Amino acid sequence: MTHIDPIVLDGHSLTLEAFRDVVLHARPVILHPDAIEEMNRSREMVESLLESGETVYGITTGFGKFSDTLIDASQVQTLQRNLIVSHACGVGDPLSEKVVRGMMLLRANALAKGHSGIRPIVVERLLTLLNQQIHPVVPKQGSLGASGDLAPLSHMALPLIGEGMVYFQGEKQSASTLLKKQNLSPLVLEAKEGLALINGTQLMASLLSLALLKAEVLLDTADIISALTVEALNGIPHAYHPLLHEARGQVGQITCATQLRRYLQGSERITQPGEKRVQDAYSLRCIPQVHGASRDSFTHVKQIVERELNAATDNPLLFAEEGEVISGGNFHGQPLALVADFLSIAMAELANISERRTERLVNPQLSGLPAFLTHQGGLHSGYMILQYTAASLVSENKTLCHPASVDSIPSSANQEDHVSMGAFGSRKLHQVLRNVTHVLAIESICASQALEFGTGLLGNGTQAAYDHIRTQIPALTDDRESGEDIAHAVAFIQSGKLRQVVFSQLKG
């Protein structure tokens, strides 16, 4: 068996790439010795506060509206257990195991910063479950995004105390039963530890991190597929001239135009201004401006999320070196809520413009190609209805992109009177991305079929893309179940295979 070096959590240096390796590829995780030392220091501070009898939120008091209720030191274990079980009130279908793995990893990393007053043994147990691929069952609904993702994180924490349900090797079972099988005893949480486990933004951050990994593939794939459409419609790549885009200076736009020129280099299917028309419609001419703006949005969202991967987000936070205990609101999900909405809008635009290109491909009045890309129109419908499907998904995204973050609803007897709704915004982002993937899949099918009606060499990158598509989806001669074609195209987009073969060709 090949040895895989573990990811070492220190609370400061977790990257999106490391997140991907752990969450998607089960790379093992351990705590850095410095993180253990920092956690011990903050834990000593908690013990000192307990001994002094000082009033400190969540340590010697109740929670939320009960923050003014003092708790006797003899009841702290009961208080922490009660917090977890009472807050585990999520509803709806379970989150995917990938999302839950992300929550576990990110919560452990946040606690590793050493500002939460939690014993290292609790974080180590969370990582044991993660490494053994024992995943808590976490319902997807119930978070307001402040005070963090309380309900989902409570479900995540239940197995640590021997409660709740888990998935293990494809089977759903009680945590208590599985812990016994694995020779793991339930933990008894001490002061502050229950609160430290559930007060944070890790559902939002996990969903957003996974969304970024998907979005990065879609951004590159959209450029590749749009280049196929440019060739199929004898487009004018002079609009992608570097001078034009450097004159504006938008980074994403420049990147997209550069990629389009690389994909189309050597093509005999493209035209010059005035050869067939003076300029193309916006859906071809403005690909760099539209795709590029989505790229820039992605870059901004990635910056915010990468900060959150290494953020201390519970309350209160302890600063042992300074001797400070600060009660504040780092659990508030507003930074993530806003960018979840932003990324939904940015990625939906890839589908908006893609559907317009698909319409140009199948509409003979716009393409000069056979109607709906079939040789025997009338007897055959060809790819007529693929544009319908794309249009329905684009329309659905318009509703899904209504921002969740502009909503707020008071909770905890109006103590928590402004919330982010970031969990919902992050969840619906994934549906937007699924819709975008299908719309791009449809364009790839129609563009490849449209190329069957022309002659001449394809570009260096587009030839590789066309060849790969044809290994999965043969040219359309007689009508067939188009849904199967879409499923094949979705698969090679989601896997990143289409992007990979094109990038490999250009490197070669």
Image (cartoon, rainbow, N blue to C red):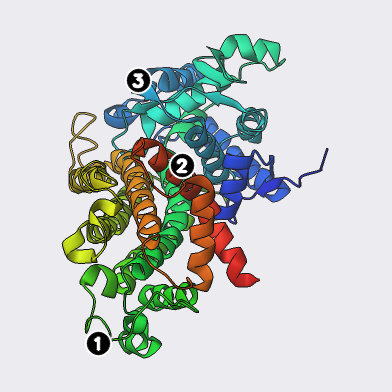
- Quadrant of the image containing the C terminus: bottom right
Mark in front: 2 vs 1: 1
For label 1, count other residues whose C-alpha is less than 10 Å away and answer few (under 14), some (14-19) or many (20+): few
Mark in front: 3 vs 1: 1
Q: In this view of the protein, can residue 149 be seen by the observer?
A: yes
Whether label 3 touches label 2, CB < 8 Å: no
Residue depicted at x 41% and y 41% = 485
Whether label 2 touches label 1, CB < 8 Å: no
Residue depicted at x 61% and y 39% = 44
How far apart marks 3 and 1 lie (CA) works out to 65 Å
Question: Where does residue 76 sit, x and y in percent of width and height?
Answer: 49, 22
> Dividing the picture into quarters, in which one does residue 363 lie?
bottom left
- The kind of residue on which mark 1 rests is Gly
- The kind of residue on which mark 2 rests is His
How far apart marks 2 and 1 lie (CA) works out to 38 Å
Residue depicted at x 29% and y 58% = 354
Among numbered discs 2 and 1, the one appearing first in the sequence: 1
Instruction: Give the residue at mark 2.
Output: 488
Question: Where does residue 428 sit, x and y in percent of width and height?
Answer: 30, 40
For label 2, count other residues whose C-alpha is less than 10 Å away and answer few (under 14), some (14-19) or many (20+): some
Instruction: Give the residue at mark 1.
Output: 274
Element type at mark 2: helix
Query: Quick check: 202 above or below 191?
Result: below
Instruction: Give the residue at mark 3.
Output: 89
